[in-house]
Image (cartoon, rainbow, N blue to C red):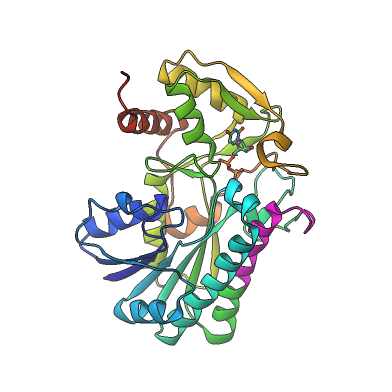
Amino acid sequence: MRALVTGGAGFIGSHLCETLVSQGDKVFVLDDLSTGRFDNIEHLPEVTSVIDSTLNQDIVRDLVREVDVVYHLAATVGVRLVVERPINTIVNNIQGTEVVLEEACRYRRRLLITSSSEVYGKGVKEQFHEDDDRLMGPTTLTRWGYAASKAMDEFLALAYWIEKRHPVVIARLFNTVGPRQTGRYGMVIPRFVTQALRNEPLTVHGDGQQTRCFTYVGDAIPALIRLMEDTSIAGEVFNLGSPECVTIEELAHRIIRLSGSQSSITHIPYEQAYGEGYEDIMNRAPSLAKLEQAIGYKPKTSLDAMLEIIIDHIRKSMPAPL
Ligand code: UDP
């Protein structure tokens, strides 16, 4: 197989490239290095990398023509970026996907689009199912622009399936974590681990009772590949996550314990973290029944196991103490 991975120099993209290369695929990466880093794929000399944006339609066309399948991961992500750069977030996410869809359809290349559990918004349910209603906050709060941009990507992808019978599959990722994820744009686990390893206070937002189900990247990648490989699947949306949920407060305690840190925990109001009027999502857990039925998905990595791997990775990448 020849595969194009947009956003291939990002955290999830780089793990996908690694697996595709290891199974003998020829991999092309398109990445504008906005949040991705060339270092993430430097160890994969087999990969052909093009540093450019998915908004550059000529480049996207040239690359799509070269491959059999397209994994579209490129997007503006991370609560911090979404809040600080809302124009960039909306334009990149919607136009970028529009370009990739148009070119994949032109050359009839099978396409997998990564979406986000953010599309469920602030709906309150024990588990979110793929066809559940979505509850979005007001347009005056920038954070909802990201959720809406990802939902628009899904609508457009499904429209290509309905109108043109173009085979697209959508994976809604739930808080994917693992080595190489950076805390720079807000993601909680790399932030807490770095704070713990520096024996600094862990900054829990709000009362810490919000929950998340963290998905290990090593479980997510084979699922993405299976969804791409199973050509009987098209025009479908799948949750891709983990059944193990944790409050952010408990997450902080676990990271302190597993890293042997001396850190304390401090609570930061949301306004201080992300500015006035920020709304968090209190609970977000996936129903995984559809994915399990389609590809036999069963995540293997427990929260403690993934935290240990991440702690080890960040510890090794930190400068040695003087
Ligand atoms: N969070 C936190 N401290 C941090 C960064 C994040 O308490 O330093 C919280 C954040 O407010 C949210 C949860 O951790 O409730 C997950 O945040 P992340 O940005 O990783 O993912 P998302 O909000 O997209 O689920």
Which region shows up in magenta? Answer: 137-155
Above-or-below relation of 53 to 86: below
Could you tell whether 193 is left or right of 85 in the image? left
Above-or-below relation of 89 to 298: below
Above-or-below relation of 61 to 185: below
Residue 224 visible within the image: yes
**Residue drawn 37% across and 45% down?**
218
Q: Quadrant of the N terminus?
A: bottom left
Q: Quadrant of the C terminus?
A: top left
Task: Find residue 236 and report its image quarter.
Answer: bottom right
Pick out the residue farthest to the front: 322
Position in image of residue 136 (x %, y %): 75, 56
Residue 232 visible within the image: no
Position in image of residue 178 (x %, y %): 41, 40
**Residue drawn 34% across and 77% down?**
63
Could you tell whether 285 is left or right of 256 in the image? right
Which is more toward the observer, 8 or 215?
8
| Magenta span contains residue 34 | no
Which is more toward the observer, 236 or 56?
56
Task: Find residue 250 and report its image quarter.
Answer: top right
